[in-house]
Image: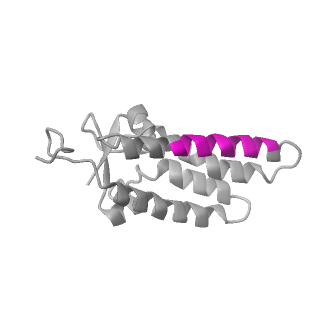
Amino acid sequence: MSPSADASGASAPDKLNRFLAIFIDGLIAGVLSNIPLIGGLLGAGYYVTRDGFEFEYMDQRSLGKHVMGLRVERLDGRPMDLETSVRRNWMWGLGPVAAAVAAFPLFGGIFSMAVGLLGLAVGLYEGYRVLTRADGRRWGDELAQTRVVE
């Protein structure tokens, strides 16, 4: 059993694979976010729900994780679902929502900047945890009681 494997034999995924998976998901959310009027909400919706889709070809994981051969597992052994995905990923929806809110006059710009800065801070913290923890679990994984495995 490898040093990063647990009792079930599952191991923390390669950090580069995780980065590439979130990069792919970011590209998808970015494309969705550029759709006029509703794009920010679509991008945020994808980011937040991406690990709980029950489409057969996605197998309850994001497209980025599917391409990179990764999977999110619940620690209780039950299958991933949309509720767990939202609990795990809510913070990744802050950026696209901030972009959508920026379109509103008066307070939109101020609110958007505040939400965007919060999203950046949380994203940096999440990345720091993935890079520095042996199990690679981020804050969202702890909130949702999940882990990412190869």
Question: Image point 61% across, 44% down: which residue?
Answer: 119
Q: Position of residue 94 (x, y in %)?
A: 62, 45
Q: Quadrant of residue 115?
A: top right
User: Within the magenta stretch, is there residue 112?
Assistant: yes
* Residue 57 visible in rendering: no
Q: Which residue sits furthest front?
A: 132
Q: Position of residue 72 (x, y in %)?
A: 33, 48
Q: Position of residue 75 (x, y in %)?
A: 28, 36
Q: Is residue 81 above or below residue 57?
A: above
Comparing 121 with 37, the one in front is 121
Magenta stretch: give its range: 110-124
**Image quarter in which the C terminus is found:** bottom left
Comparing 41 with 18, the one in front is 18
Q: Is residue 132 left or right of residue 127?
A: left
Chief secondary structure of the magenta portion: helix
* Residue 49 visible in rendering: yes
Q: Is residue 120 above or below residue 24?
A: above
User: Within the magenta stretch, is there residue 55?
Assistant: no
Question: Image point 32% across, 57% down: which residue?
Answer: 59
What is the tally of numbered marks visible in this picture?
0
Q: Position of residue 19 (x, y in %)?
A: 42, 58
Q: Quadrant of residue 77?
A: top left
User: How are the residues colored?
Assistant: one colour
Q: Which residue sits furthest left?
A: 1
Question: Image point 80% across, 42% down: which residue?
Answer: 110
Q: Is residue 77 left or right of residue 43?
A: left
